[in-house]
Amino acid sequence: MRWMTRISLEKGQMEAVGGSWLQERYYSNDGDTVGDFLSFRSVYDINPFEVGADHSGERAAYTARRVVVDRMLDIADLRSRPFISLSNGELRRVILAKALLRESGDVVVDGGCGGLDCEWRRRIGETARAMLPLGVRLRVSGGKGRPPRGKVRSGRARGGRAVPPSPEEAAPVVEMHGIDMSFGRRKLFRNFSWVIREGERWALRGPNGSGKTTLLALITGDSPFAYACDVSVFGMRRGEGGVALRETRGKIGCVSSAQRAYDGKTPEHQLAEALRPGVRLLLLDEPCCDMAPVAARRFSRRVVAWLRAHGHVAAVWVEHRQECVPPEFSLVMDLSR
């Protein structure tokens, strides 16, 4: 009988971050690293006080797999990073790596590879082929599928500055100018600028780790860098004018797949909270991640209907695949390197 292990990247993410909070990634530079999470003792759940046990067989298998997993999933560059600092997609990649380091036989990823960008979805197939000689048969089951393709986007990004087709007379809702941001030796933004105006519908794209969620955190104030950068929301720069952060956040509705890993709320619950009176900016951070196709289409229709009834509200939809974003989001900010 062939041994089969089923894993869910969504559930794995929820288990991995349990007991912490989403904003911690912007405040903490210490704690367990990816290397700790993927160490031999962690992967095989070995008691650190255990003595005398012979794990030579498991260690040999782990060592052989680590070479392949590090190369195929680009884990080596992540090992020194604090685990809590990873982006949504990077975290799911590490969770998949841990399963591949330990399990044998058939390893089935249930629910697809939500949270991984287009390039990584393609590379999962290459990873599966590379793991075969090591006795691991990796395959992906299910997923949210592809909603119908929308119209071609009319906005574009040049050197980190978007060129919108909308009238310049609309009042700015968010203004970012000359943003420079680094995490250790990793340069995330260099002289980045972006202006979001009333009624604009933006699609924010970019590979895992490119800074999409970090940009949203600058807007909401979840990241302390918002106070060190030139960021203004609703005409007020962070920390100026005596406006409380709570008052600003009250005008922002958020739906976030990453946040769901921490609070366990459903997308529908998040959306119901986000579409409230007084909202002037709607932020949708991979809102349909891990959803079935029917549920994703229903969710999108509800968002579009609400925005049509609230034409003054600006909105940003974060997504890896263009065809998953409603065509109403006709402006594009692309963070691809």
Image (cartoon, grey):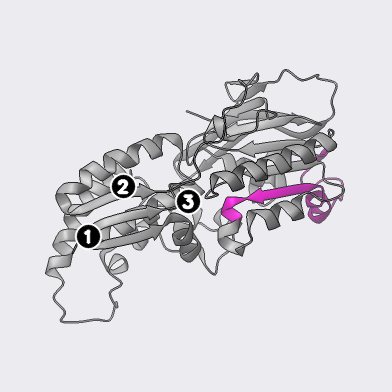
Dot 2 alpha-carbon crowd within 10 angstroms: few under 14, some 14 to 19, many 20 or more: some
Residue at position x 84%, y 25% in the image: 170
Q: Is residue 256 magenta?
A: yes
- Quarter-of-image position of residue 265: bottom right
From the viewer's perspective, is residue 143 above or below residue 24? above
Left or right, 71 with reference to 264: left
Inspect the image, locate mark 2, and give the three-letter code of the amino acid beneath it. Answer: Ala
Q: Which residue is mark 3?
A: 86
Residue at position x 87%, y 50% in the image: 242
Left or right, 239 with reference to 255: right
Calculate the distance from the C-alpha at mark 1 to the C-alpha at mark 3: 27 Å
Q: Which residue is mark 1?
A: 104
Inspect the image, locate mark 1, and give the three-letter code of the amino acid beneath it. Answer: Ser
Residue 117 location in percent, x, y?
46, 38
Closer to the eye: label 1 or 3:
1
Q: Is residue 299 magenta?
A: no
Evaluate whether residue 150 shows in this view: yes
Residue 328 location in percent, x, y?
70, 29
Evaluate whether residue 178 shows in this view: no
The magenta segment is: 234-259
Q: Nearer the viewer, residue 151 or 64?
A: 151
